[in-house]
Amino acid sequence: MNSGLYCQPVEHLGSECQPGGCEFFPTEERKTARGGRLDLPFATSHTWGKLKSSREIDLDVGIVLVSNWTGAGRGRKSVMTTNGKRALIVVDVQNDFCPGGALAVAFGDEVVAPLNQLTREFLARGEPVFKSRDWHPRQTKHFAERGGTWPVHCVQNTKGAEFHPDLIDEIHIRTISKGLGDKDCYSAFDETDLDLQLRRLGVEEVWVGGLATDYCVKSTVLDALRKGYKVKALEDAMRAADVNPGDGERAIEEMRRAGAEMVNSRADSLVATDARHPERDDPDPISEAYKGGIDLTLIRERLRMTVDQRLERLMSLQKFAEELREAGKRASHS
């Protein structure tokens, strides 16, 4: 998705502005104000840059905003935010798969607490979170009554199909619905756009937990590996149906052999993960130099925005860009 916006030369907008002093840095390569294009990939968090005019611009992750147009900021580049490289996939934590449900997994509700903790951590870092769900029509060959394997469960718009009531529900969490037809769709990738969304977000690694270990979790993990993602399977945040005794253990071993890393959500939290990635302990000095100018209150407010509000902000940005263009034209003719 591309905004079609272009930043024009603005050297005459203020006495301290210099030719080429306004630069946008797309995700892959830097392009200067003279023809630099602003790309807007799908994402869940924002970064802000303040211009000399005190205007504020907020854009999705992957966009880097312009340097301060002040004498003190001259010669520095803008704060750069990178695409979120990880995503959390919460698989089918629905009422019908939890104790008391139509197809209950023993102790299935125990996955809620660790998944909620990880959800908070991912969202706090602006990394995407997906919740998949079985979303079956009432009549489907997936059910035993029509020749399938399973009793009726997770029928669209029923209590059983709802997510567990204690599972975090947040506007920035994306829902993936599967099993809308007759096919047995165990994986969150089956007949969904999950892979497309992950690639648009620049995700390279997925963390997977939920229900049930030996069916939908396993299928999601194996599909993610086949599609080229690095996978961490959250061993303490999944529970097995164990239709046949030992199915859960065998599923874990199959995921491990396929290349998934079996981790514990507490020991392998995002904080612990950072310690294993030295590059994250050595922050970019340019980014660090601008951290003091970021208003975290504004960031939190933007993260609570609805889709309509975000679109409104982007339209405001487009209007601002047009104002810059017009100002540049007027200045060049004066």
Image (tube, rainbow, N blue to C red):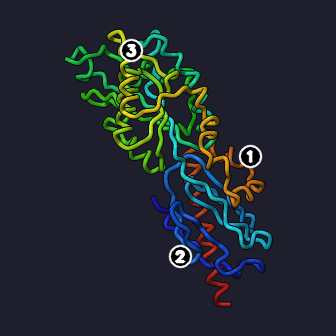
Q: Which residue bears the numbered disc 3?
A: 241
Identified by mark 1, the residue type is Thr
Q: Which mark is residue 297?
A: 1
Element under disc 2: loop
Q: Is residue 128 above or below residue 91?
A: below
Element under disc 1: helix
Quadrant placement of the N terminus: bottom left
Identity of the residue drawn at 73% across and 71% down: 69
Kindly indicate whether the residue at mark 2 contacts the one at mark 1 (C-beta within 8 angstroms): no
Give the class, few, some or many, for how many residues have Cα within 10 Å of label 2's Cα (few <14, many ≥20).
some
Element under disc 3: loop
Could you give the CA–CA distance between mark 1 and mark 2, rounded to whole angstroms?
Answer: 33 Å
Of pointers 3 and 1, the one earlier in the residue sequence: 3
Towards the viewer: 101 or 262: 262
Kindly indicate whether the residue at mark 3 contacts the one at mark 2 (C-beta within 8 angstroms): no
- Front label number (3 vs 1): 3
Q: Which residue bears the numbered disc 2?
A: 35
Of pointers 2 and 3, the one earlier in the residue sequence: 2
Identity of the residue drawn at 39% across and 47% down: 196
Could you give the CA–CA distance between mark 2 and mark 3, rounded to whole angstroms?
Answer: 57 Å
